[in-house]
Each structure stands twice: as C-alpha cells, then as structure tokens.
Image (cartoon, rainbow, N blue to C red):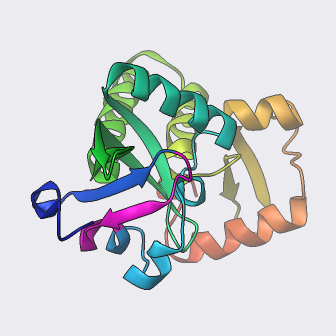
Amino acid sequence: VQEQYGSFFDTGPDGVVLVDVETRTFLAFNDRACEALGYTRAEFARLTVNDVEAFESPEETGAHMRELLRHGVGEFTTKHRDKAGNLREVRVMVRVTHVRGRPVFHSIWRDVTAERRLEQVVASRLALMEAASSGSLEELLTRTLDEVEPLTGSKFGAVKRVQPDGSCVLEARSTHAVERFGPVSGGNSPYPEAWEACARELDKVGAYPGLR
C-alpha cells in the first residue's frame, strides 16, 4: 500500500498514516509517525488508533470517525500517548480516500506540543504580571501555583517558607489544594513531614528565593 500511495507520505516533518476505517489499524505510515511516539516500525505496525489516542475513548473515536466519513475531510486537535506514556498534543488533518475499494483515512499528524506549551507559558507570564501589579503577596503566590500546576502536570501546589531552625511555614496553596485540603491556617498542611522534607531539600538549591 505504501509503495502504491507513496505521494501521500511526502509531507516533510509531519507524521502520515493510512488508517483502516473498520479495524482502526495502520495500513501504512511514514517513519515520522512512529518515531514521534517512540516506536519502531515493527512495533507501530501492531498498534491501532485506540492504542495511541489519549483524549477520546474508543466509543468517542468511533463516533468521530463516522462523522469524518460523512464529511470526507476534517481537522482537529487531540492528544496521543507515546511509548513512554507521555502525552503529545497533535493537530490531525484527515481526508477520506479509498484503497482497493475500501474507505481509509489519509491522516497527517503534526505535533504541536512545544507550540502549545510556549503559548501557555506566555499566557501564564502575562497573567502573573497582572496579578503582581494588583494583588497581595498571598494572591500572587496562589496565582503562581495555579499557573504552574498545568505546566508541570502537578495535581496540587504549595509554597512553604523554611525557617532558620529548619521548620516550615505554609505560605500559600493553589486553588486546587485549597479545595482539597482547605485554606492555609496556622501553618498546617497535609502530610507535614513529607512537605517539610521536600521544602528543606529544595531550599538547599535555592528553590525559595526571597522567601527564606
């Protein structure tokens, strides 16, 4: 198939795949498609769309594929999971074509992970500049944690000040941490020993500039 439709795979740095509509297997693909997700060609050939799709459930993917069949073309952003388990944000451009009388999806995968991350960083910087000019220190710390959480993939965030005697005082929690554990009160925090050990270790490398 790949030799017969070789022109389909000439797209420079983008991944290109031909997907069987019924089985969701990859009938053909270029090196970029598998390399971008950390697979060898032999490994990738054994996968299906369901194995790499990380945003939609198999049922949602099926509904999406039926919609693409009706329209003939489509373009959307989704998330793919690579071999190591990391998520990649991918812009997908699809056109329905036919191979040996069967409908298949000719799909171009463009990895936009770095581009989206840069957009998030810029937006976070602007938000923090605004917060710094209009809010209190506690509000700024909370907003900083709120911005950092999605950028680092963290569930909860907190800022603790390490005192001269080695003990820690909780300065602020992220909005998610407040919802889960409650607001800052009297320096208490969930898992205090773990928090204090972490804070002391980070303090050794200057992770709390200006807060010591």
Task: Say if residue 72 shows up in the picture.
Answer: yes
Q: Is residue 164 visible?
A: no
From the viewer's side, name the closer residue of 83 and 176: 83
- Within the image, what quadrant is residue 179 found in? top right
- Where does the N terminus fall, quadrant-wise? bottom left
Pick the residue in front: 55 or 73: 73
Q: Is residue 26 magenta?
A: yes
Closer to us: 177 or 170: 177
Question: Is 185 situated left or right of 119 in this image?
Answer: right
Total residue callouts? 0
Please state, as top left, top right, bottom left or bottom right, where the C terminus lies in the image. Answer: bottom right
Whether 126 is drawn above or below 105: the answer is above
The picture places residue 27, in percent across and down from the top left corner, at 39, 63
The magenta-colored residue range is 22-33
Q: Residue, x 57% and y 77% (percent of image)?
A: 204
Residue at (51% x, 28% y) in the render: 66
Q: Check the image and report above or below for 170 versus 14.
A: above
Q: Image quarter for residue 30?
A: bottom left
**Extreme residue toward the front, this view:** 101
Task: Give percent across and percent down for residue 164.
Answer: 70, 67
Q: Which residue is found at the position 26% from the left and 59% from the top?
A: 15
x and y percentages locating residue 197 in the rendered image:
77, 72
Q: Is residue 78 magenta?
A: no
Q: Nearer the viewer, residue 165 or 78?
A: 78
In percent of width and height, residue 149 lies at 57, 45
